[in-house]
Amino acid sequence: MTAGRNFTHIPSTRSWLESRPHRLWLAAEGRQLLDFSKNARLEHGFGPLDGKGRLAEDSVADTILTARMTHAYGLAALQGLPGCGALAQHGVDCLRGPLRDARHGGWMPDEKHPDDRKQAYLHAFVALAGSTAVVLGLEGGQALLDDAISVLNAHFWCEKDGVMRESFATDWSDEEDYRGANSNMHSTEMCMALADVTGDPVWLERALRIVTRFIHTYAKAERYAVPEHFNRNWDMLRDYDRDKPTDSLRPFGMTPGHFAEWSHLVLKLEAALLLRGIPAPEWMLDDARGLFDQAVRSGWHVDETPGLIYTIDWDHKPHVRVRAHWVQAEAITAALSLFRRTGAAEYEGWYRRIWDYVDRFCIDRVEGSWFNEVDPKGHVSEEIYPGKADLYHAYQATLAPVLPLAPSLATAIAQGALDDQI
């Protein structure tokens, strides 16, 4: 079970998740994140903001950010938050227009690099944005989703392996000799949203195949530390990006934040299967526990200071020690998901403990939003992530505590799951 090191909060008989003041705090924090990121709007999508919430003069629309913003503002619009629906519609229009590859299909990474490779990671977020747009009823939302599903089926889904292929040249030639856990993790989230929106259970079947391979097979064999990098023959690439320890998508070693993220995705998939009357494998809860336990065992308080670090090496020792904001956000969601699933007080304790860390070190009460990363002592760092480009992880961490494990976020909000929460 999880270690009690530096455990400063003893859960009371009443959970924070049952507290109306806590839910009000979450809602207020979510709104400030949304308000800060509204400045990211560009003519052809959304771009990265600096620490003060400003766009650079030469900013161009980034497709991953545009898809994430479309999804996040779509979730906000479903709650009735003014101004958010227009931003989500802007995202749909740009994903269907200037950011789409009109010649070969699929999506470009940004306007400056139309010939860069087409990535599963990016396309998972485009499909997620499309699914949220459909739930919200945005103009062009169904067309965006249909287009994304067509691309996923034609190019990315590998039926033989039960995972997503990683990347291709812009004309869909030259498949990369790589299989990555990160892109498949976000594809798992996408698959659950697509299952809810399309009604097609094939997406849950695909999500389960992804989880079975990456978690129940490979991660379990590594004591629930998730290996990230493989070639197409499923040889584990232990030296992959050894010279790029701070790569933002494929760093060397293993990423405790991903252990936590996979943990709650496994529980959400279990809940999604059961909600549809589909049997869920008995190992899913044990695997979710193992993933979270390994995340905090190998990643928390490694410098005698709190916070989850970015990466560990193959001996489960700290490698890159900065604390990225998204890692803390995903650990919050994992802790609350395990508490909701098991009722075990230790997970309520972790939920409080990680929020306390975020409140002290991540929230920028001068300029707004969250610092993208801090160093072990809590000082602002830009070793991996410059500025404050991301809304997706932090905003979802304010929503997950007030929503069920299934269905997925947009569908749950549309079905009224928030109506009695705040």
Image (cartoon, rainbow, N blue to C red):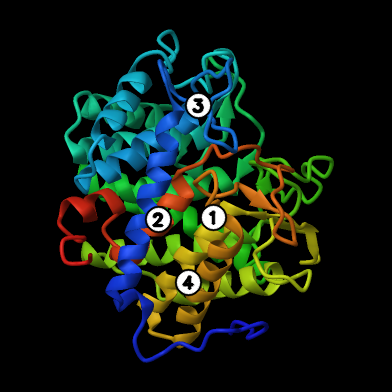
**Which residue extends farthest bottom?**
13
255 to 167, vertically: above or below: below
Q: Are marks 2 and 1 in contact (CB under 8 Å)?
A: yes
322 to 344, vertically: above or below: above
Give the mark nearer the N terminus: 2 vs 3: 2
- Asked if residue 147 shows in the view, the reply is no
Q: As rendered, which of 191 and 359 lies closer to the eye? A: 359
- Indicate which label's residue lies in the foreground, 2 or 4: 2
Picture coordinates of residue 240 (x, y %)?
A: 77, 44
Q: CA distance from mark 3 to mark 1?
A: 21 Å
Q: Name the quadrant containing residue 361.
A: bottom right
Q: Is residue 193 left or right of residue 230?
A: left
Give the mark nearer the N terminus: 1 vs 4: 4
Please tell me whether mark 4 sits on a helix, a strand or a loop. helix
- Label 2 sits on residue: 29
Q: CA distance from mark 2 to mark 4?
A: 19 Å
